[in-house]
Amino acid sequence: MRSHCGVIWSLITSDYWWVCVTAARPTSTTVNDVKLLCLMEKAVLQMRPNHLLIMGDFNFPEINYTEGTVSASPTDPSSLFFNKTQELCLIQHVTEVTRVRQHQAPSTLDYVFIDEENLIDYITYEPPLAKSDHAVLEWNLLPAVQDIKSTQVKYNYYKSDYGSKQTNLQLVNWDDCWTGKKQSMKCGQTSHRYWKCR
């Protein structure tokens, strides 16, 4: 577990998953917000886990991931955070309000990010625990997407010798091949009968 004066970063690893849990204080400084962005970037780009799940209370009420907007200036920490998650191709799954407090506007402060689509099936929003004002989030995480083995034959066309094919095609007398063969074209529709030249 790592703490940067208001940002807690806990990492749980397995052979296949990295799970990062974070909690940011509302009074977090800009320096700490930048450190959070650096940790996220390091987790995605340098550590290169098979799959990454980042979740927690990020305290950015200005961000609306559903609409893809941020109601703050481009240099505000919430804008920088939103842009960084987009740059890192992280998919955010929380779409409903997660914090409700009397005399304050309901907001979405808790996020669940993942690095690949279709690994979170759904998210349910449960009532807060004890005196908390944050919803309890529950989701179904698919451990791995099964690779479908294809039995279809696939050719490596880029390895073909196109030069010799072109030379061979230039040696064919195409007028002789089409003599006596029927070809019809009507009103923009084309129908061909292809004949094998020998």
Image (cartoon, grey):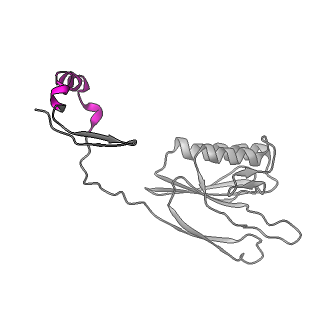
Q: Who's the residue at 74% across and 78% down the image?
A: 130
How many labels were placed on the picture?
A: 0
Question: Residue 118, how many percent across, how many down?
Answer: 50, 60
Identify which residue, 15 or 5, lies in the foreground: 15
Rendered view: 193 above or below 174: below
Q: Is residue 2 magenta?
A: no
Is residue 167 found inside the magenta-colored segment of the image?
yes
Q: Position of residue 198 (x, y in %)?
A: 10, 32
Left or right? Give the position of 107 relative to 47: right
Q: Which residues fall within the magenta stretch?
A: 156-177
The kind of secondary structure the magenta stretch mainly shows is helix
Relative placement, left or right, of 134 versus 89 is right
**Residue at 65% of width from left, 42% of height from top?**
38
Q: Residue furthest left?
A: 198
- Residue at left 39%, top 43%? 187
Nearest the viewer among 73 and 156 is 156
Given residues 39 and 83, the one toward you in this image is 83
- Residue 35's spot in the image, x, y percent? 69, 44
- Residue 89 location (% of width, % of height): 57, 47
Name the side, left or right, on which 159 lies relative to 20. left
Quadrant where the image shows the N terminus? bottom right
Most distant residue in the right direction: 103
- Please, is residue 114 above or below residue 76 in the view? below
Residue 80's quadrant in the figure?
A: top right
Q: Is residue 158 left or right of residue 165?
A: right
